[in-house]
Image (cartoon, coloured by chain):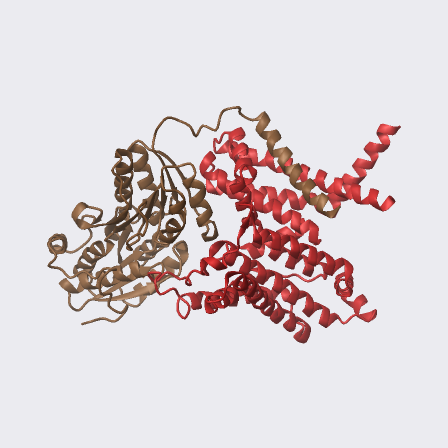
């Protein structure tokens, strides 16, 4: 009973914080919109329309959320171990590369088999990339902050080289991209609204939750996060856990790439990811490193992003202002989810309760 | 309970958003205004890049002055292409994708929106769908004239060519530049650099400076915003430059000898006019010097006789007696001088 109540107030806290962030961001965002002479009511109405207003809008918002959230889950797992995975971008590119190679190479197979193999390929590609950073960390003690960033560059340029040479589309008039994957390998959309990638997303979040909260590995990850020296003293295999964490993060990043390839882009180019790996870091931060928090944060950012890009042309919001707006929302979401603000809110709430009784 | 959190947070956003709507303006959507033809454009870059994207936007403005109602989406990242195309197709009569890469997106979306006219710029392929039009300016013809001007102007016989990427359309123009230069100056060679960016002004400037240091004395660019850096670098090094896209002489009046105009805007405006008049048709449209879609601005800061040579070459290109490498024809291997 007590536990349930505590859980409930936690949920209420999350809703209050999110609401607060959205109101604050909307207010600050309005300043920028007003400077541009945009009709505020119409602008926010359009943002809402374009993110939630129709099944087409919801579908696109979810498509937007898929790669961001998947890669963010990988960052979140690493956060819990006190490890900074800044390599999401590289893991996405390697995942997408493996997926496109598998799907184009085995294009004779039936669609569902291709989809499963493509996703597995993506997980392997991303896992390999995360694993390299993990091995460098546990074998040589190299900081993952540096290695994951460097591996981003390497992955990007490997893909860039391949799509301009060995795997370039011969019918693409020289454009740097691969052939398109066969239509049967496209991730289907359920009920015309829910892309299969979104289902994958929820499954991945649940798996990560189970991993962190219900398994021995999860305990190891969290005790590594509590402090390496303490962990080592209590018998934790620090090296192995650190390696496993980056491997898992890589698998999730690779899945993000594969899901965007099969569910949206259909081909690999060196413009494949517009920086999801870094958006993922912010998303995990907003989600406070928990699986469910990251899922919620990723969905929020997906809907916001899609709503704001869609509203650009409809409401005449200049692109730069739209980007500022997204940034303001994200910043507010991060601010309200810091420990200081969360604690202050909790205190305010309890004193309010006390006051009303007394 | 965990799922309850997720639903809660989403509901919270929904409530908030609708609350704002409620206290905002009560105007209707506004999209039902009259029977104007509605034209929308998706651009990969910023509309004020002094180059490719700006020329597309100017085309859209022509549609507006032709009487269309316009909207656009700029700086669109690749993963958003399909989504943007489809979103705009739902509420517009004409949807324009600015750039070759939209050809395939149009092919993907067009069958679902048979009443919408789709236009793709810079695409030399013949579209498969009846409601898709590809517009291809024959820019190589302009590059050939730029080559003639450069060949007449250079004293070191070294001409520089700086382009954003090694796309075939750009490679063809570099080949045409060399052909034009050699038609008036057999000793001239073209030294080509591909920057790997259309946006990095500093990189464009650096490339121009290093070309000047290697003895190049006329630099031609096809690099949009980065090309602004190319002209800047040429000015600093005291060598000549040839602009691209729009008349760029105002960037460095003493440095720029001419600009290759590629008037995508006129092609786009013409297509809109057809849609407004009701005689728009799908298919491939190629146009160049003949109708002024492609041109070289009057030459200045160049030796006497340069303008005359350009005018002569223009005639030869139009009547077909000059051999201009174009994207459809033979593109000589890049960087291999044939003299």
Q: Is residue B55 left or right of residue B28?
A: left
- Colour of chain B in the image: brown
Spot the residue most to the bottom: A139
Residue B32 sits in which quadrant?
top left
Instruction: Give above or below for A119 relative to B56.
Output: below
Pick the front one: B251 or B116: B116
Q: Where residue A179 sits: x, y (%)?
A: 41, 62
Q: Residue furthest front?
A: A110
Residue B28 x/y as whole percent: 49, 25
Q: Is residue A17 above or below residue A213?
A: above
Answer with left or right where residue B31 lies relative to residue B310: right
| Residue A300 or residue B216, whichever sits in front | A300
Image quarter of the C terminus of chain B = bottom left
Residue A36 in percent (x, y) is at: 48, 34
- Chain letter for red? A
Report whether A65 appears left or right of A11: left
- Name which residue lies at 33% across and 39% down: B60
Q: From the viewer's perspective, tell me whether residue A112 is left or right of residue B327.
A: right
């Amino acid at each position: 009973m007590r536990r349930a109540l505590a859980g409930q107030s936690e949920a209420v806290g999350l809703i209050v914080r999110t609401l607060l962030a959205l109101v604050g961001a909307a207010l600050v965002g309005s300043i920028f919109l007003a400077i541009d002479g945009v009709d505020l009511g119409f602008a926010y109405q359009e943002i809402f329309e374009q993110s939630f207003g129709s099944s087409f809008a919801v579908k696109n918002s979810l498509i937007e959320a898929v790669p961001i959230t998947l890669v963010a889950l990988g960052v979140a797992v690493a956060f819990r171990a006190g490890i900074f995975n800044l390599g999401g971008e590289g893991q996405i590119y390697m995942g997408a590369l493996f997926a496109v190679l598998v799907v184009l190479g085995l294009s004779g197979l039936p669609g569902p088999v291709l989809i499963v193999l493509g996703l597995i390929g993506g997980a392997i590609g991303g896992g390999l990339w995360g694993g390299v950073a993990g091995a460098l960390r546990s074998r040589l003690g190299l900081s993952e902050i540096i290695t994951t960033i460097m591996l981003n560059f390497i992955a990007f340029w490997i893909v860039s080289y391949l799509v301009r040479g060995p795997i370039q589309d011969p019918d693409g008039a020289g454009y740097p991209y691969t052939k398109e994957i066969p239509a049967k390998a496209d991730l289907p959309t359920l009920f015309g609204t829910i892309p299969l990638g979104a289902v994958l997303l929820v499954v991945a979040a649940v798996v990560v939750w189970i991993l962190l909260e219900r398994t021995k590995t999860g305990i190891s990850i969290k005790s590594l996060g509590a402090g390496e020296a303490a962990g080592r003293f209590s018998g934790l295999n620090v090296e192995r856990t650190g390696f496993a964490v980056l491997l898992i993060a890589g698998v999730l990043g690779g899945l993000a790439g594969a899901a965007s390839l099969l569910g949206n882009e259909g081909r690999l180019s060196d413009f494949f990811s517009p920086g999801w790996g870094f958006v993922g870091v912010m998303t995990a931060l907003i989600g406070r490193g928990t699986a469910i928090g990251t899922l919620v944060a990723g969905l929020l950012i997906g809907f916001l992003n899609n709503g704001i890009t869609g509203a650009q042309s409809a409401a005449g919001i200049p692109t730069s202002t739209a980007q500022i707006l997204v940034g303001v929302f994200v910043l507010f979401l991060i601010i309200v989810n810091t420990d200081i603000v969360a604690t202050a809110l909790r205190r305010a709430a309890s004193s309010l309760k006390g006051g009303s009784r007394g | 309970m965990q799922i309850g959190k997720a639903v809660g947070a989403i509901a919270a956003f929904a409530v908030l958003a609708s609350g704002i709507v409620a206290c905002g303006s009560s105007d209707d959507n506004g999209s039902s205004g009259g029977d104007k033809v509605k034209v929308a454009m998706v651009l990969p870059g910023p509309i004020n890049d002094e180059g490719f994207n700006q020329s597309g936007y100017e085309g859209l403005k022509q549609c507006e002055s032709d009487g269309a109602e316009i909207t656009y989406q700029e700086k669109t990242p690749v993963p958003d292409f399909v989504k943007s195309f489809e979103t705009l197709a739902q509420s517009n009569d004409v949807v324009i994708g600015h750039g070759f890469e939209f050809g395939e997106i149009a092919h993907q979306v067009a069958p679902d929106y048979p009443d919408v006219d789709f236009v793709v710029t810079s695409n030399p392929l013949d579209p498969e769908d009846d409601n898709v039009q590809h517009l291809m300016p024959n820019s190589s013809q302009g590059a050939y004239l730029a080559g003639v001007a450069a060949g007449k102007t250079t004293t070191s016989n070294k001409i520089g060519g700086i382009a954003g990427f090694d796309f075939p359309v750009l490679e063809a123009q570099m080949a045409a530049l060399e052909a034009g230069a050699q038609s008036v100056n057999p000793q001239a060679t073209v030294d080509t650099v591909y920057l790997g960016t259309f946006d990095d002004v500093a990189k464009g400037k650096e490339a121009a400076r290093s070309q000047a240091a290697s003895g190049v004395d006329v630099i031609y660019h096809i690099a949009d915003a980065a090309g602004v850096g190319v002209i800047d670098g040429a000015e600093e090094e005291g060598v000549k430059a040839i602009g691209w896209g729009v008349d760029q002489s105002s960037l460095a009046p003493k440095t720029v000898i001419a600009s290759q105009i590629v008037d995508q805007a006129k092609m786009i405006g013409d297509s809109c006019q057809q849609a407004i008049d009701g005689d728009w048709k799908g298919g491939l449209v190629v146009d160049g010097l003949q109708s002024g879609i492609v041109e070289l601005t009057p030459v200045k800061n160049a030796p006497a006789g340069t303008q005359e040579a350009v005018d002569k070459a223009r005639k030869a290109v139009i009547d077909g007696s000059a051999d201009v490498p174009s994207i459809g024809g033979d593109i000589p291997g890049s960087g291999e001088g044939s003299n």
